């Protein structure tokens, strides 16, 4: 089990890898070899990841905070980074120490990667329930 402590809105929060509600992999082009522990390793080893407050029109399904009060927007914390794959298998992330001095274009030209994905951590600001979402994207 891994932990990650982050600051947002001048407060400190903690999430744990074994409390992940769901890892949502891309439906059309899923990534192999990337799991919650790897997602946390990258969080813990990087200085570049910053959580920001975001507001959604849907409440957290775990706690439904604000639903009774009929709120129109619900607060979450969110952070993102990119991962790169070769033939659908996870290779490296843009926040990985080994990526320093690299770029997707350099790695692609060298035949080391062929696709990119954005990894999103979406955390309920009330109960700290969270998901990790992987979506295919172009860099």
Image: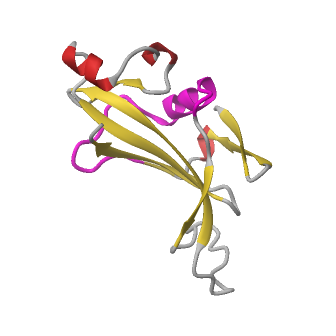
Based on the picture, tell me whether residue 29 belongs to the magenta stretch: yes
Residue 46: image quadrant is: top right
Residue 23 located left or right of residue 9 = left
From the viewer's side, name the closer residue of 95 and 135.
Answer: 95
Q: What is the number of callouts on the image? A: 0
Model colouring: secondary structure
- Percent position (x, y) of residue 122? 54, 53
The quadrant in which residue 111 appears is: top left
> On the rendered image, what quadrant is the C terminus found in?
top left
Residue 54 placement (x, y as % from top left): 58, 60
Q: Which residue is more in the foreground, 64 or 74?
A: 74
Q: Position of residue 28 (x, y in %)?
A: 21, 48
Q: Judge whether residue 70 is colored magenta.
A: no
Instruction: Answer above or below: position of 90 versus 8.
Output: above
* Residue at x 50%, y 29% (from the top left corner): 38
Q: Is residue 105 above or below residue 26?
A: above
Quadrant where the N terminus is found in the figure? top right
Residue at x 43% of width, y 27% of height: 94
| Image position of 48 (left or right of 100) | right
Q: Which residues are magenta?
A: 24-48
> Residue 120: horizontal and vertical position, in percent?
47, 46
Residue at image coords 46%, 13%: 98
Residue appearing at x 58%, y 67% in the figure: 60
As drawn, is 116 to the left or to the right of 62?
Answer: left
């Amino acid at each position: 089990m891994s932990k990650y402590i982050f600051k947002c809105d001048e407060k400190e929060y903690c999430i744990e890898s074994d409390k992940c509600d769901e890892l949502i992999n891309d439906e059309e082009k899923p990534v192999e070899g990337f799991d919650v522990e790897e997602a946390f390793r990258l969080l813990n080893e990087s200085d570049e990841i910053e959580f920001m407050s975001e507001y959604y029109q849907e409440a957290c399904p775990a706690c439904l905070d604000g639903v009774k009060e009929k709120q129109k927007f619900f607060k979450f914390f969110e952070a993102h980074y990119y991962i790169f794959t070769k033939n659908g298998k996870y290779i490296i992330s843009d926040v990985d120490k080994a990526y320093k001095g690299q770029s997707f274009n350099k790695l692609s030209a060298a035949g080391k990667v062929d696709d990119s994905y954005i990894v999103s951590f979406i955390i309920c600001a009330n109960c700290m329930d969270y998901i990790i979402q992987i979506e295919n994207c172009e860099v």
